[in-house]
Amino acid sequence: MTAFELIRALAHRATVSVVVTDTTIASPGPIILCANEAFGRLVGRDLIDILGRSPRFMQGKETRRDTLDTFHRALAAGERFHGYLTNYRGDGSKYRAEVDCRPLHAADGRIEHFVAFEREVVRRIGRPVEGAGGRYEPTRVSNDLLTDGLRDLGLFEHA
Ligand SMILES: Cc1cc2nc3c(=O)[nH]c(=O)nc-3n(C[C@H](O)[C@H](O)[C@H](O)COP(=O)(O)O)c2cc1C
């Protein structure tokens, strides 16, 4: 089983949003090959309208170009991008997304896909806590085991 197949199977009914793309970095890529139902709910679109498109469809007026440049550089270097983006839903409403995107390697080391775990966060009220995620907190606390497992692996900055 490849990492792609494993993630697809695990993500199916998970509450954490998962999206997998090919490795084409320049437009029209990266192309979305698979996304779970939670991702469809997060971005407010039917999965059928997402597959085959680039995640750029979520961008809008307040999506920061400098963050996208950092994202682009990470993809081009085959490195992890973990950051916060302003995304737009199908109905035009915006939300703050925590995006943890990583390359998936084949046995020979080649990058085969990119996978991102995404969730909505809001600005934390009060004093920031330690770490990159200190200014934000998730809008929903999940009791999904996959989300717990990913958190244990350090995928998201905070609970
Ligand atoms: C798996 C994956 C998930 C992504 N999710 C988002 C996202 O939620 N919002 C967003 O604005 N860009 C997202 N992107 C980044 C864009 O697809 C694109 O790479 C980014 O705009 C930088 O490229 P550009 O400089 O050509 O615009 C994602 C990329 C990948 C590979």
Image: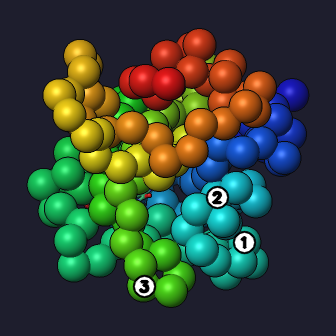
Q: Position of residue 85 (x, y in %)?
A: 31, 55
Mark 3 vs mark 2: in front? 3
Query: Considering only order in the chain, which callout, 2 or 1, is on the residue closer to the N terminus?
Result: 2
Secondary structure beneath dot 3 equals: loop
Image point (42%, 84%), residue name: 92
Query: Considering only order in the chain, which callout, 2 or 3, is on the residue closer to the N terminus?
Result: 2
Tell me if the residue at label 1 has its CB under 8 Å from ligand 1.
Answer: no
Disc 1 and disc 2 in contact, CB within 8 angstroms: yes
Farthest residue in the front direction? Answer: 126
Secondary structure beneath dot 2 equals: helix
Q: Position of residue 83 (x, y in %)?
A: 31, 40
**Residue type (three-letter) at the residue carrying disc 1:** Leu
Q: Which residue is mark 2?
A: 39
Task: Specify the quadrant that holds the N terminus.
Answer: top right
Image point (26%, 28%), residue name: 134
Mark 1 vs mark 3: in front? 3
**Number of the label disc, if any, that sits on residue 47:** 1
Image point (20%, 28%), residue name: 128
